[in-house]
Image (cartoon, rainbow, N blue to C red):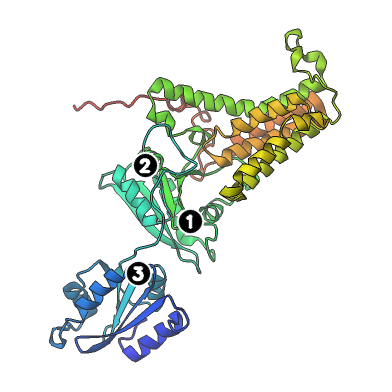
Amino acid sequence: MLTGQMVQDYSMLHEKLRPDMNYDIIERPLFIGGRAAFFYCVNGFVSDENIQKIVQFFLGVKGSEMPKEAEAFAESYAAYGDVVLKQDISSLITAVLSGLGILVVDGYDSGLVFDIRNYPGRGVQEPEKDKVLRGARDGFCENVVTNTALIRRRIRDPRLRTEMFQVGDISHTDVAVVYMEGIVRKELLMKIKHRLKQMKVDALTMSQESLAECLYRQKWFNPFPKFKFSERPDTAAAHILEGGLAVLVDNSPSAMILPASIFDMAEAADDYYFPPLTGTYLRFSRILISLIALLLLPLYVLLMQNPQWIPECMQFIKPAEEINVPIVIQVLILELAVDGLRLASVNTPNMLSTPLSIIAALVLSDFSVESGWFNSEVMLYTAFVTVANYTQTSYELSYAIKFFRILLLLLTALFNAWGFAAGLIIPVWAAASNRTIGGMSYLYPLIPFRWKELKNRLLRPRIRHRTEE
């Protein structure tokens, strides 16, 4: 706690912030109204112009004008920026390290905290992942204040709430919960706020993923994603208006959307930027392609193990060349190779992307078939499945489909038709037994069945105009 005695308060702040060792901590001694004072901030988090305005204004205060209480001083002379009073030393230190400026004045047992942050960061350009053919081209950035502003720009309603929390005993990461009061599900809101307040963690080292693992600890082995991540403000705003909420983490350019069912994962912004018929077609195409991506390769392995099941009109699907390596081994090698190329493309500098593309084309080309390791039919079906994975807007859902596809492949190869049947039951069971963070079924509104809501999930509904009574 601040004592109001400058010698003691200065020594406590100086010992914790150590501006003599940290070149980016600014410690500015001042005399305000004949009293000793110190201003603290982090260089790079605030602009020099803001510091100059605050310091220049306080230097003009006369000793006869100094109030006895810090509250009166803040009301009379702190005219620049958002100002709050704090007495706790740890709160003042956290404020400085969060980008705020603090002013402690001799004789006052409270410090003035100025919100004059000006974080360095990139703009709100369209995200690389959540692109659309039509619609807004802005996206979230790493600044949580900017991200909340992007949502409020779309929802100009006084019921929109943006509550801020600090999570992490060391990192003190800002976490904003955005929702519509009166529309949000109260049970979900109370549960999220309670878990954020009771969360015991040192730091959110990986931003949203660290927070997600702390919020939802059950059934980590179930690959179906429990959260929907989006870098689009319009997607987050639409979900908020439907009764959900968005969790924004500072330093993360995406929003966690809660609650998220499997139908939420399958939706995309393009569904609503086109007419209802086109949007419904896009949604059905995405769902159908995902099912094909799950079943195509295991079904092909099953038919190759049981060639007598192949009808006469489908005999062309049999490999034309000699099979040197078992088909299931070929598929597993190609699955691993595709993931390897994906990781390589992420870590490859732009100047080397062309050589990587050439090498990838050589690896997955006729040379692979001519070497005898792979059959052209397996290469074709694997290529289709690889492209199909990119139809999903959610990376987590596409990898969940991939994991279940590999499991289905292994079960089919080991136990034939019975393994294929078991491999179909496992993902259905995993989805049915899964729960959203709000406790609802992951398959809602299919389980429990609600036809009206299910129809809106499968078909792109029209925007209905309210009629005034």
Can you tell which mark lies on residue 49? none
Q: Earlier in the sequence, mark 1 or mark 3?
A: 3
Give coordinates of residue 78: x percent, y percent: 21, 73
Q: Is residue 427 left or right of residue 266?
A: right
Residue 171 in the image: above or below residue 354: below
Give coordinates of residue 189: x percent, y percent: 41, 49
The image quadrant where one finds the N terminus is: bottom left
Say few, some or many: other residues with alpha carbon within 10 Å of mark 2 (under 14 / 14 to 19 / 20 or more): many
Give coordinates of residue 399: x percent, y percent: 62, 39
Residue type at tag 1: Arg
Q: What secondary structure is marked by label 2? A: helix
Residue under the point 13% across and 83% down: 65
Can you tell which mark lies on residue 100? 3
Residue type at tag 2: Ala
Q: What secondary structure is marked by label 3? A: loop
Q: Is residue 50 left or right of residue 67?
A: right
Q: Earlier in the sequence, mark 2 or mark 3?
A: 3
- Label 1 sits on residue: 195
Say few, some or many: other residues with alpha carbon within 10 Å of mark 1 (under 14 / 14 to 19 / 20 or more): few
Residue 459 in the image: above or below residue 262: above
> Based on the displayed image, in which of its 4 quarters is residue 309 positioned?
top right
Q: Furthest-left residue in view?
A: 64
Residue under the point 61% across and 49% down: 348
Can you tell which mark lies on residue 237? 2
Q: Nearer the viewer, residue 145 or 193?
A: 145
